[in-house]
Image (spheres, rainbow, N blue to C red):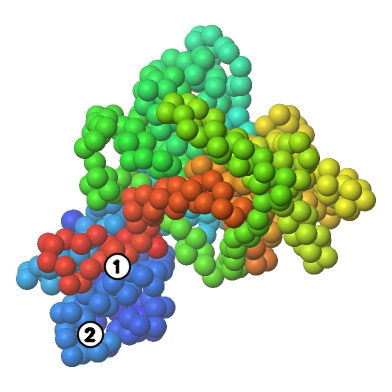
Amino acid sequence: MRKDQGNTNTFELARTSIGLEISLHTNAKIENRQNKVLYSDDFFHLDSNTLSTIAAALHSKNSGTGSKFGSKNIFVPEANPQTITLSKSKERGACFNTGELWRPHLLRFLPNYPFKDHQKIGVSWLHGRKSGILADDMGLGKTLQAIAALDQHIRDKKVKCSLVVCPKSLIGVWEAEIKLWAPHLCIVTVCSTIAESKWNMVGQQCHVAITNYETIRSNNPNPNTFDLVIYDEIHKLKNFRSSSYNSAYKLRPEITWGLSGTPLENKPTELVSILHLIDRNRVAISESKFGPASLRSLASRYILRRNKTVISGELPSILEKIEHVPLSREQRDAYNKIRKKGNTKQLSQWIKLFGQLRELCDFDPNTHRSTKIDRAVELVKAIRQLDEKVVIFSYLVAPLSLLHSKLISELGSAHSLAILTGSSSASDRTDTINLFQEKQEPSVLLCTTRAMAEGVTLTSANHVIFLNEWWNPAINSQARDRVYRIGQKKDVYVYRIRTIDTVETRLEEILNSKSELFSEIVSKLSSDILDHNSETPKEYVRLLA
């Protein structure tokens, strides 16, 4: 071990038979957080959270020395690169257990990829695993990382043919991204029913086959056709009893990767189902076995998650605001009439009534009066005065259609507006998104949440309006992050319009509860949870905040 004499904050990393060692010499100033580590003639940065953890651990072993440390070693054996494990060992002192953060020799063979630091780690992590879920927050480039890791496997001749399974709306995204970053790879897209023999032909003739969940559900490939399978938006396979899950389960690739910014949406068993799919020999399906802590421990073996703090210096700020509005008189009268019917004991009737009340929060179907629509029109007019763009989400088509008509009346033209729903064709969808991203008009895009919540970049807008919200907070977050993601240059403003004294108050409680569950199990995979005062032998510290 030796310290780079030209930089008091640089340490040479030497390979050993059992791992790596970093020697922190006397007077190493951890607190300025400019540290680099030299490994195989390349440098990588230790992020500030990691440095803080190291500094705190060493400080606890050297009380009274302030920020200047005596000679201490940190041993780093091969392990899961997501986590650092701190153990108090008399023989070694402060000990951190992690895997290689990234392997420079891998990236040298992928010179055309515009990697950010967190993506370098993600590529290396995927490339080194047979089973894994890249669960980065939306907008951090999961598709790019997966393509790069796959590309290297194909270059190494470890993979002959791979299969990408994604939502139908994302097939064009995968085609475009592979053609952009790995044009040497042969692609075949399968979007209709074909015989098993033709699947075998696909496997023999291309590097990457791209299909959707509907196709594999109705038409299974030969289980051994593909060496590697990537499930984009793998949370769509959260129900192990579904036909889509059973179809995916029949595949027997050597390597299985999943991509999802929201691997857990409603309940813990969903995550267990996904983990079982990617590693069925080590993870068993269980309805009740896992509590939040044990499930998080299990997930940490398979999931790499980073949130947007890894690019916090690159992204502008985001401001989220709830816009509370009262119901109009017409809405309230209709609302109260339906509410009085709520004396049934049948669950199906309660669900029906709840749905009717939610729809009345958007507008009165008889008079078309809507305080939400009125407020949305006011917001759109103010945003357009700033010469900025806005995306408006609704999980129902009817409020969007009503708002679209009102905006045409207010703005005097439909030229500034575009609307996309689940019934929009793939070509219309692509053309509209390209126009919205590249041209000054349209400046207002109205879309249904499910149709546009995944795999779309809308960074030309910096305002988001939710007329209403889905039951699932993960879907709402995905929708918001079409705008707030890599490539966004302006501050982002999010407006959630909610009615006062209605079922939307209860919905807010449900959304908050589900968000807390996601935070408890998944978000903590990307946070530093070290407790220096804990008596537990090992505390898990997340490497990437």
**Residue lying furthest right:** 412
* Mark linked to residue 13: 1
Task: Look at label 2 and name its amino acid.
Answer: Phe
Task: Look at label 1 and name its amino acid.
Answer: Leu
Residue 356 pos. (x, y %): 60, 35
**Helix, strand or loop for disc 2:** loop
Q: What is the quadrant of the N terminus in the image?
A: bottom left
Query: Quick one: 411 or 239, which is closer to the camera?
Result: 411
Residue at 62 percent across and 38 percent down: it is 337
* Mark linked to residue 36: none
Query: Quick one: 19 or 59, which is closer to the camera?
Result: 59
Residue at 41 percent across and 78 percent down: it is 34
Eyeballing the image, is 524 above or below 231? below
Residue at 29 percent across and 67 percent down: it is 13
Residue at 21 percent across and 81 percent down: it is 59
- Measure how far apart labels 1 and 2 are at the Cα level: 18 Å
**Residue lying furthest left:** 90
Residue 204 pos. (x, y %): 51, 19
- Is any atom of residue 184 visible in this view? no
Residue 329 pos. (x, y %): 71, 49
Mark 1 vs mark 2: in front: 2
Q: What is the quadrant of the C terminus in the image?
A: bottom left
